[in-house]
Amino acid sequence: MLKQLRIRNFKGWKDTGDIRMAPISLFFGANSSGKSSIGQFLMMLKQTVESPDRKAVFYPGGKNSAVQLGSYQEMVFHRDPGNKIIFDYQWLLPEILKFKDPVNSQDFSGDSLVFHADVGLGDKDQHTLVVDRLKYELLEKDESKLSIGMERRKSGTKSEYKVEATHYTLRRKQGRAWSFGAPVRFYGFPDEVVAYHQNADCVQELNLHHEKLFRSLYYLGPLRTKAERLYSWTGIRPESVGYQGENTIAAILAARSRKISLGYKRPAKPFEEIIAFKLKAMGLIEEFKVNPISEQRQEYEVKVHTKGSSDWVDLPDVGFGISQVLPVLVQCFYAPAGSIIIMEQPEIHLHPSAQSALADVMIDAINARENGKDRNIQLIIETHSEHFLRRMQRRIAEDVVSQEKVSAYFANITKTPATLDPLQIDIFGNIQNWPENFFGNEMGDITEQAKASIKKRMQKDEKPEASE
């Protein structure tokens, strides 16, 4: 789970400042304010980690990627190739990381890692990205236990790297010294670091934990696929519902043997029942089921029973909002334990009361348990919904969700450069620093409507009656 994030010189952000990442992290702002860039940046890093090209510092994406960011010049702040993209983040480890220094037998352990990197274009080749600096820091209860990193330095006409460590003494092997190769992608220590030292095996552990972090990331975009009358499923378990929710029905079928509890001491129920229960709680349907067409075919139909009707109908025959929110609900409970789920506008095409109820779904998702253990899901949500936020404020005041489990930020484009301002939510659910016209000027509209009504009534009263 991400605990802290900071990004500099990426797209519209000169500096996001330190972002506190909570189990539910919310990002608000006007269109084109940069709030989507936070999730895009994280997904670009995920794409890079999963790219087969170990030499590519960043993989900005291709035709079938979650994000396509183009060239470095297109993603760097002010499109200035002289700027370096600088970022750091802290994440909690699912288990305590322990290792021993083989040289002096000293033990090290920590519950979280911090990663920092500076990336920019090379000095001579203005088309090649290079890592100027990377550093890992191992923390235990926020206390630094050690740090190891690489830094680029110029030596004649070529760039070389040096390895530095704090609170950990790297011991060089005897023999001829040689220069280290460039880092692997944006985060990885090259093999030479291990080969050069007697006690640098731990850097491979750091590489591995970094890769595990980004493999736990899942993304659902704002435009989901439309509903179909028939869905094919060959029995393969999808990794997720897909970037556009295209695997939603396959995920439901694959999860039929799973049981989910919506909180401590709450009964575990079959996966499909949980989804149907949530759709009903949102006021969208009464019942929901996925049926095979026949035993000989690998095709399924989704039947929905809506309120006020006794008939079962196909998913395309009900409101568009149901097919758009179904991937959201399924992804929240389908993703593996320890997942980080990035969603853009999960409330899209929902009416206000359903948007409010969606906040309760998100709270249940972070509290959910499976096989007697917490699922530890983290949600990173970009939204425009005032109703979603209002319900979240109410639940904080009611102690349904603690204040610490929710963080909210507002992309403020009234400043130059733009800033990402934290919304200060107190234990009563109040926002202490509510931005002006955050969701429009509601009071202004009410006032102007009242003025217009008075003016119209006065004009009506002053109009002379027609003569008989």
Image: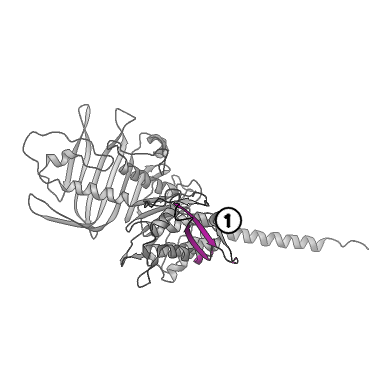
Q: Is residue 55 left or right of residue 168?
A: right
Residue furthest right in the image: 468
Q: Is residue 299 magenta?
A: yes
Residue ID for mark 1: 317
Q: How is the image coloured?
A: one colour
Between residue 15 and residue 129, name the one nearer to us: 129
The residue tagged with tag 1: helix, strand or loop? helix
Would you identify the image quadrant in which residue 311 lies?
Answer: bottom right
Residue shown at 15%/46% (left/top)? Answer: 201
Residue range in magenta is 280-309
Give residue 82's position: percent from left, percent from top: 35, 34
Q: Is residue 322 left or right of residue 166?
A: right
Residue furthest left in the image: 174
Residue shown at 44%/59% (left/top)? Answer: 329
Dividing the image into 4 quarters, which one contains the C terminus?
Answer: bottom right
Would you identify the image quadrant in which residue 350 lies?
Answer: bottom right
Crowd around label 1: few <14 · some 14–19 · many ≥20 (10 Å): few
Q: Is residue 458 left or right of residue 288?
A: right
- Can the viewer see residue 428? no
Residue shown at 43%/67% (left/top)? Answer: 396
Dividing the image into 4 quarters, which one contains the N terminus?
Answer: bottom left
Residue 62 in the image: above or below residue 208: above
Between residue 395 and residue 256, name the one nearer to us: 256
Would you identify the image quadrant in which residue 112 lies?
Answer: bottom left
- Can the viewer see residue 411? yes
Residue 157 in the image: above or below residue 153: above
